[in-house]
């Protein structure tokens, strides 16, 4: 079962990087993050899972949609060959650095109290991280308000 | 107490709908009344609860919510500033935002920014703080590009991109703190780092937080977004951002994290002092050569944020009091100056002050209030800016940092210089007949500017009362260092 989550994460992460359509790329990133949050839950880290889901739902998507809205009228320029070469290189370097960091810190991480980790998702969301829900609502509302402001037509909406 | 976050947030959610029914009056009235009520409430709370730390658990229908809100001198000071500035900018917007239209959408973003900043300062853990910080930032991106012009949208995009680095840096800091302490609440992270005894990890976290919050606080070398975001946007954005956002998302977070969680270890105080000093000098020098009003004040904000960080970074009671008093004063006079810039631009249609001239007779209220703002900014007695700068200089002398004290004084002279260049270019000097059609701003804009100018003067005249009533309790919390964590734990 886990292998599907890992495969899903890898495939959608790569799609997020290589897709030319910005909206599809943003959606791929969101799907990849959902797979990642599933992996967190499977690994017994529901708080990290909740964070991953909330960041995807609240923050990243809002930021990307706002960015896509802001740049939609800008003429498209063909991507340069350099970017195509450098991107996989940067990814490879990042994976190597990441592996070193993880290896270096793995043994030193403080064990997260088991009692909190074993709480069910709804318990964490409603009873422990309640104020975060307010923050997430603020995030989503801010995103919606920003999109509404950018999508409006000056003059028509103002009359 | 949750009211401070929930009330403006609910209203913000309803604003686009309200805006459909009433294009102008209802959004204006609802926003101004809400912010006025919350301003009075926060003022009363500051008078009643200004002792120690109170952890409040809100109740809904007799049931306690699992939300912990921290009320202490620092949060109460900032809460009052947020609602005071929020209310005065809101009444300025009644006339100023007419030309932009879509007031429902505008107040939606505006109130969300206010609600998110309140949530940020009431948060008791790093992740909640981060969530509200992002919400406030997203609302501010919306406000930067609100005019929908190409330049405004480009500025919004640049601001978003640069802020993303700050957010990533803060988030990485939170992740490392969580990984090594097993907690994200202030108490858990602070006590975790104390027990961990690994200053290297704390140093990495501190560096990431300093980069992230330093960018939010507009400190050099993280200041690149400030002039670009402040120049083309509606004038209310720089007023709110310079007056509030860089204080709450930047300086408040620096105080809370570096003093109350990490406890100013190692070279952190020196780092804060040097970043503050470089920002003071760099911001003032960059402001000197500007011809555009808002760009000048944007660089000036960097310089003044430097004063605040320098005072706080000293870590002495007098330095912290000076820094926090300057934070309060800067919120008032910089909001005033950006509103003055908005008033000037609305009347003349130009952002450049150097080709104006002699507008003092045409716009007496804007001229007089901007003079009050400039005198406060430059630290001229009896305005509020003088006393806070004096306290910072005295704190520097107290710890025998004479060189830095001289720099603080000299930059204050530079500040007066560029303020006078602005005053001469815009309001004094020979009247330029091209601007004979110019009229003074409408009533609500004038009311807002006059109120802020009066606060600049009054808070300078009664500064001991303000320091004793609001600044000292806030300074006690900052200087209590990691003992704050014990207060949070109920000791």
Image: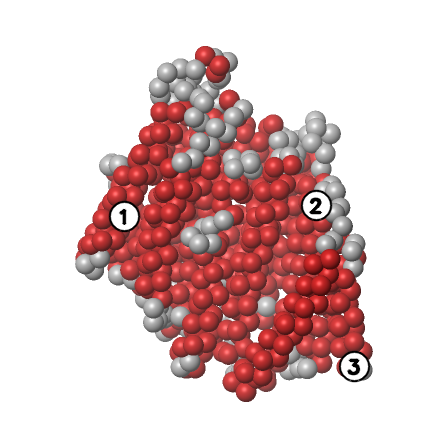
Residue in view at x 52 percent, y 61 percent: B129
Subunit ID for the residue under disc 2: A
- Give whichever of B229, B320 is nearer the camera: B229
Tell me residue B174's x, y (percent).
Answer: 53, 69
Up-down: is A61 above or below B386?
below
Instruction: Tell me: residue A116, above or below residue B344.
Output: below
How packed is label 1: few (under 14 Cα within 10 Å), some, or many (20 or more)?
Answer: many
Which residue bears the numbered disc 3?
A3
Q: Which residue is mark 1?
A: B408
Label located before the other in sequence (2 or 3): 3
Q: Secondary structure at mark 3?
A: helix
Q: Residue, x 56% and y 78% (percent of image)?
A: A101
- Seen in the image, is B379 located left or right of residue A98? left
Q: Are marks 1 and 2 on the same chain?
A: no
Chain letter of mark 1 equals B
Chain hosting mark 3 = A
Q: Quadrant of residue B314?
A: bottom left
Can residue A119 be seen here? The reply is no
- Can residue B416 be seen here? The reply is yes
How many circles with numbers are drawn on the protein?
A: 3
Asked if marks 2 and 3 touch (Cβ < 8 Å), the reply is no
Residue displayed at 51% across by 22% down? B348
Query: Helix or strand or loop: what does disc 1 sit on?
Result: helix
Q: Residue B76: where, in percent of width, then height?
A: 40, 54
Q: Which residue is mark 2?
A: A71
Give the CA distance from mark 1 to mark 3.
Answer: 61 Å
Q: On the picture, is B487 further left or further right than B398?
A: right
Vertical order, A43 against B480 (above or below): below
Residue A107 image point, x, y percent: 54, 87
């Amino acid at each position: 079962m886990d292998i599907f989550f890992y495969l899903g994460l890898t495939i959608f992460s790569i799609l997020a990087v290589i897709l030319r359509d910005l909206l599809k790329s943003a959606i791929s990133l969101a799907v990849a993050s959902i797979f990642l949050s599933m992996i967190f839950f499977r690994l017994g880290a529901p708080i990290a899972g909740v964070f991953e889901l909330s960041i995807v739902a609240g923050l990243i998507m809002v930021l990307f949609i706002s960015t896509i809205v802001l740049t939609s009228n800008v003429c498209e320029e063909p991507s340069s060959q350099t970017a195509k070469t450098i991107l996989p290189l940067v990814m490879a370097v990042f994976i190597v650095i990441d592996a070193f960091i993880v290896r270096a810190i793995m043994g030193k991480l403080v064990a997260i109290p088991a009692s909190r980790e074993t709480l069910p998702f709804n318990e964490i969301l409603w009873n422990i991280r309640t104020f975060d829900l307010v923050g997430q609502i603020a995030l989503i509302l801010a995103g919606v308000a920003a999109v509404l402001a950018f999508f409006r037509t000056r003059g028509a909406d103002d009359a | 107490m949750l009211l401070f976050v929930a009330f403006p947030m609910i209203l913000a959610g309803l604003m686009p709908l309200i805006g459909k029914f009433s294009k102008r009056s209802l959004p204006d009235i609802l926003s101004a009344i809400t912010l006025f009520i919350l301003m009075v409430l926060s003022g009363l709370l500051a008078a009643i609860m200004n002792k120690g730390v109170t952890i409040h658990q809100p109740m809904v229908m007799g049931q306690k919510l699992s939300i912990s809100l921290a009320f202490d001198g620092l949060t109460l000071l900032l809460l009052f500033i947020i609602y005071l500035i929020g209310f005065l900018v809101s009444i300025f917007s009644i006339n100023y935002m007419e030309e932009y239209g879509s007031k429902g959408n505008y107040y939606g973003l505006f109130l969300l920014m206010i609600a998110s900043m309140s949530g940020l300062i009431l948060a008791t853990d790093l992740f909640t703080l981060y969530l509200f910080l992002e919400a406030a930032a997203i609302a501010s991106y919306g406000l930067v590009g609100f005019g929908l012009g190409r330049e405004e949208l480009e500025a919004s995009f640049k601001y978003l991109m640069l802020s993303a680095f700050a957010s990533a840096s803060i988030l990485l800091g939170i992740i490392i703190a969580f990984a090594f302490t097993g907690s994200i609440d202030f108490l858990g992270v602070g006590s975790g780092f104390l027990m961990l005894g690994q200053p290297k990890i704390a140093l990495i976290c501190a560096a990431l937080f300093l980069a992230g919050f330093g960018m939010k606080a507009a400190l050099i070398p993280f200041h690149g977004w400030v002039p670009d975001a402040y120049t083309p946007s509606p004038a209310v954005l720089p007023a709110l951002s310079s007056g509030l956002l860089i204080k709450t998302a930047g300086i408040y977070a620096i105080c809370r994290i570096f003093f109350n969680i990490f406890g100013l270890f190692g070279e952190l105080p020196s780092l804060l002092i040097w970043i503050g000093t470089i920002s003071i000098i760099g911001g003032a020098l960059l402001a000197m050569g500007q011809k555009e009003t808002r760009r000048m004040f944007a660089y000036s904000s960097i310089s003044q944020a430097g004063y605040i960080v320098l005072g706080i970074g000293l870590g002495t009671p007098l330095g912290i009091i000076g820094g926090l008093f300057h934070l309060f004063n800067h919120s008032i006079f910089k909001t005033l100056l950006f509103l003055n810039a908005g008033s000037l631009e609305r009347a003349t249609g130009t952002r450049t002050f150097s080709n104006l001239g002699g507008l003092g007779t045409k716009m007496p209220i804007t001229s007089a209030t901007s003079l009050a703002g400039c005198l406060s900014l430059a630290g001229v007695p009896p305005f509020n800016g003088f006393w806070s700068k004096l306290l910072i200089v005295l704190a520097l002398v107290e710890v025998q940092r004479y060189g830095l004290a001289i720099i603080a004084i000299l930059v204050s002279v530079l500040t007066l210089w560029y303020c006078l260049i602005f005053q001469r270019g815009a309001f004094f000097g020979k009247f330029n007949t091209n601007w004979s059609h110019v009229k003074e701003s409408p009533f609500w804009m004038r009311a807002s500017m006059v109120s802020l100018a009066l606060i600049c003067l009054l808070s300078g005249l009664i500064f001991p009362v303000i320091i004793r009533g609001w600044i000292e309790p806030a300074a006690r919390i900052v200087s209590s260092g990691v003992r704050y964590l014990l207060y949070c734990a109920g000791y």
